[in-house]
Amino acid sequence: MPADGKLLWPTEWRKSKLCLLLPSGIMLVEMKILLISRPVVSSSALLTSVWLCGPEFLYNECSFHPETSVSTLNDSVSTLNDPVPEERCCVQSTIAVNHLPNSNDLFQKYSSLSKLKRVAAYCLRFVNNCRNSKDKITGFLNTSELTNAINMLIKSVQFIVFNNEITALKRNQALSCRSKILSLNPFLDNSGILRVGGRLRHANIAYGHKHQMLLKKGHILTDLIVGYYHKILLHAGPQLVQSSIQEQYWIIGARDVIRHLIRKYVKCCRIRTSITNQIMSDLPITRVSPSLTLWNRLRWSIPN
């Protein structure tokens, strides 16, 4: 507490300010007890004597204590050279954020299904050539490579969209009652692709016609497939496009998706113009003139 008896604010609780306010203070050189906050060896004789016994002048009476003025304190503080400086640890925190690759980035780069299939096929060929350096595949892409590429794309999309259903089927568990594809009786084929079930197992048709690959509306790959079939069918209507798509794929809500995408095509909007109606001539007089009613021209036969 200062000599005038006034209390200090918490912001003024500092060692330097307290020393300046004291009428007679202790030299910082005499405060060797501060060595405990310095990196010194604990077994040293200086630290042991000061820590256990304290400064030497404390053994004398108060009249023999050293008197130091404020100016002397200021000079001592400014000219003091601490041989053992205080070491402060600087802690740095580093946060590493791992951004997982987004699967939609590949689909957003290409606006056509044909180009997307070829890019995926070349990627699969590169992986195959890296694993099998002796039997490398070169030349143009064949049909099997393009088929494997589209199957890989559909499988990656299904793993994101129908993750809960695929996990349940792999564990031989029943699907949730809230699943939107529960009525389709889905199953996983040998390649791990989610397909539609049904009762056409013994039908004499292609395997893809009996069990179509499931897709969800709103995904970029679904829109690319609809646009691809719409173009190869020469901008056909929604019914023909839907029947052609369902030979291999089963899109949930396919009718709404196909109608929505076809209406967005600029070429189809230009072709789909309103039919002009020709102005007809006036009706003949016999069709607009009133005539006799039919009841007075009928012959009534009265039975005997």
Image (spheres, rainbow, N blue to C red):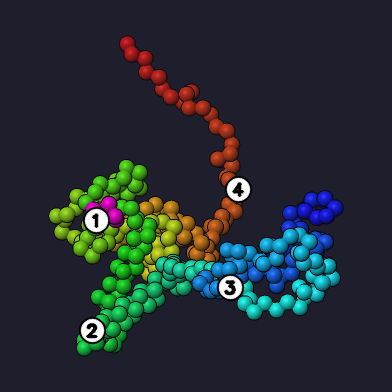
Q: Which residue is mark 1?
A: 170
Disc nearest the viewer among 1 and 3? 3
* Circle nearer the N terminus (2, 1): 2
The amino acid on which the numbered mark 4 sits, given as a three-letter code, is: Asp
CA gap, disc 1 and disc 3: 74 Å
Say what secondary structure mark 1 lies in. Answer: helix
The part of the chain drawn in magenta is 166-171
- Evaluate whether residue 90 shows in this view: no
Main secondary structure along the magenta-highlighted residues? helix
Q: CA distance from mark 2 to mark 4?
A: 83 Å
Circle 3 packing at 10 Å, graded few (<14), some (14-19), many (20+), is few
The spot of residue 45 in percent (x, y) is 55, 73
Cβ–Cβ under 8 Å for marks 2 and 4: no
Q: Is residue 1 depicted above or below 32 in this figure?
A: above
- In primary-sequence order, the first of circles 2 and 3 is 3
Q: Residue at x 36, y 63 (%)?
A: 157
Is the residue marked by circle 4 packed among few (<14), some (14-19), or many (20+) residues within 10 Å?
A: few
Residue type, mark 2 in image: Asn
Mark 4 and mark 1 residues within 8 Å of each other at the beta carbon:
no
* Front-most of residues 270 and 291: 270
- Which amino acid is tagged 1? Lys
> Amino acid type of disc 3?
Leu
Tag 2 secondary structure: loop
Residue 50 among those drawn in magenta: no
Residue 186 position in % (x across, y down): 26, 52
Q: According to the image, label 2 marks what residue?
A: 132
Residue at 34% over, 65% down:
156
Seen at 63% across and 76% down, the residue is 85
* Image disc number at residue 46: 3
User: Circle 4 sits on which residue?
Assistant: 282
Disc 3 from disc 4: Cα separation:
128 Å
Q: Who comes first in sequence, dot 2 or dot 4?
A: 2
